[in-house]
Amino acid sequence: MGQSKHGLSHSDPQPGPQPASSIDDGFGGRPPELRSHRARLVTRIIHIWFAFSRPMTLGVRAACFDREGRVFLVRHSYVPGWHMPGGGVERGETLGAALIKELSEEGNLELTGEAALVAVYFNSRTSRRDHVAFYRCEVRQIEPKAADREIVEAGFFALDALPEGVTAATRRRLAELAGETPISDIW
């Protein structure tokens, strides 16, 4: 697997960073700012479907740190920016099981200790029904995450060297964890 200077995994077996056009992200390699309209549309359609199938949506996200204190971030194919890994909690699934599943799927990550629940947020920016359980955890990566249709880039980053495009919500959560700002009720 190729690795960029930030330790990002790519699906191309050639070493070094790959041009965005070489990654099949389902959006023709377009950068996040050019697919944001489509991303908003896809997100809206998903939430309309969930409105009929679920009275409330619940998700998990985690600030995942490795032994060096670096945080793991992912860049999705369907929404712009760098995010902490996470996803939806399915019917019949516990928060803990959903967290373990999402960390494995989005980063080949494995918990090295107990995940600590930081807070449950109302994600009003997504919909009036969405909530996110946010965890802090220590992890190890079993193997580098190869790009796929959902995750186009992933890697560990030093807190003072985050990639360009980290979402405002991700920055807020990291500031809360550092004690720089109080924990909010809103994602």
Image (cartoon, grey):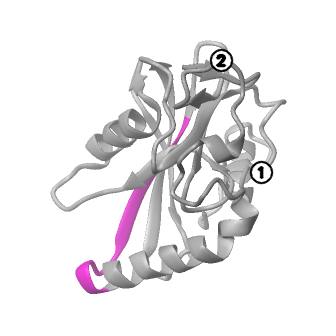
Q: CA distance from mark 2 to mark 1?
A: 24 Å
Judge from the rendering whether residue 81 lies leftward or rightward of residue 112; answer left or right.
right
- Residue 40: x, y in percent? 59, 76
In the image shown, does 95 or 23 lie closer to the viewer?
23
Judge from the rendering whether residue 140 lies leftward or rightward of residue 91; answer left or right.
right
Q: Which disc is residue 15 wearing?
A: 2
Indicate whether residue 96 is drawn in magenta: no
Q: Which disc is residue 81 wearing?
A: none
- Seen in the picture, residue 163 relative to 166 is either above or below; the reply is above
- The residue carrying pointer 1 sits among few (fewer than 14), some (14 to 19) or many (20 or more) residues within 10 Å by Cα, namely few
- Seen in the picture, residue 142 relative to 36 is either above or below; the reply is above
Q: Amino acid at mark 2?
A: Pro
Q: Quadrant of residue 180?
A: top right
Tell me what residue is drawn at x 25 percent, y 59 percent. 90
Q: Quadrant of residue 52?
A: bottom left
Pointer 1 residue? 165
Tell me what residue is drawn at x 40 percent, y 58 percent. 59
Q: Quadrant of the C terminus?
A: bottom right
Mark 2 residue element? loop
Q: Quadrant of the N terminus?
A: top right
- Seen in the picture, residue 136 relative to 133 is either above or below; the reply is above
Which region is colored magenta? 52-63
Residue 184 visible in the displayed image: yes
